[in-house]
Amino acid sequence: MRLGLVRSELTKILSTRLWWGLLIGVVLYTVIQSAASAAFAGLDPGAGQPTTPGLESPETLRGIYAAAAFSGAYIFALVIGVTGMTGEYRYETATPTFLATPRRVRVVVSKAIAHLVVGIGYGVVAVLSAFLAGGLVVLIRGNDLGLGSPGLWRAVALAVLAVGLWTLVGIGIGTLIRNQVAALLVAVAVTFLVEPLVSVGLYAADLEEVGKFLPSTASSAVTSPPAVFGELLPWWAGALVLGGYAVLFAAMGVWLSVRRDVT
């Protein structure tokens, strides 16, 4: 793999306004999510609902710093992955790109690596935003930041990696559906609507063991937030499942790009 191709793909991404527009979204979403998680942790929700663990709980701290960072960044990483492929066809740059480098496998793999780097960058920014916003609320509430909490740094590192892997999922979706608007709608709808409904349905049907292997649920296991529906996979199993989805979608992108006509 030539580093020049990866640099070229990175230049494509960074030469547009989309990447930093999405980055602003990462920061804003993460700040709100992390601050809210820290503000309401351990408070009595009323209406007979169980009280969530307080700020002294390692699980809560992982939710504030790692889970909030992931949930605030992964959808934006997915979007930039989708547009990374669909943009080539929307703006008709796919033909000169593949003519310059006739071996399409190299192009698509370089594109996947470049987007993975950007996705990891989004994850790092999200984590920093979570520590800043969530940590500030934790201090205001009179608690220690809890940076030595068990499993915290592992969850933070995996959250960054998980965000990056979601760009590969986006690359696969963008290769499968060339129309940019349609690809974005499908990606966001499946992630935010279809998958949660499927998860609820599996839980209601006592098939939560199957639901553990859905992409978003596996991602949740990686960052170790409080489980909503049943138990999650162990963090290492969640990482393997998410990595498997990323490899599957990236491989699908390579395969389709080689077999399909450009126009």
Image (cartoon, rainbow, N blue to C red):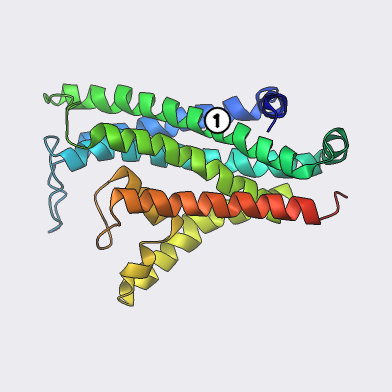
Name the amino acid, label 1: Val
Nearer-the-camera pick, 110 or 24: 110
- For the point 86% across and 53% down, the residue is 261
Q: Can residue 56 be seen in this view?
A: yes
Residue 111 lies, in percent from the top left, at: 67, 36
Viewport quadrant of the N terminus? top right
Taking the image as shown, residue 131 lies to the left or right of residue 83, namely left
What is the number of callouts on the image? 1
Helix, strand or loop at label 1? It is helix
Residue 149, above or below 186: above
Residue 157 lies, in percent from the top left, at: 35, 33
Q: Is residue 184 visible?
A: no
- For the point 13% across and 42% down, the residue is 43
Q: Classify 10 Å Cα crowding around label 1: few (below 14), some (14-19), many (20 and above).
A: some
Taking the image as shown, residue 41 lies to the left or right of residue 224, namely left
Taking the image as shown, residue 166 lies to the left or right of residue 101, namely left
Residue at the bottom extreme, as displayed: 205
Q: Mark 1 points at which residue?
A: 117
Residue 51 lies, in percent from the top left, at: 12, 50
Residue 263 lies, in percent from the top left, at: 88, 50
Residue 250, above or below 68: below
- For the point 56% across and 35% down, the residue is 116
Residue 209, above or below 151: below
Residue at the front extreme, as displayed: 1
Residue 27, above or below 173: above
- For the point 63% across and 39% down, the residue is 112
Nearer-the-camera pick, 79 or 209: 209
Quadrant of the rendered structure where residue 148 is?
top left
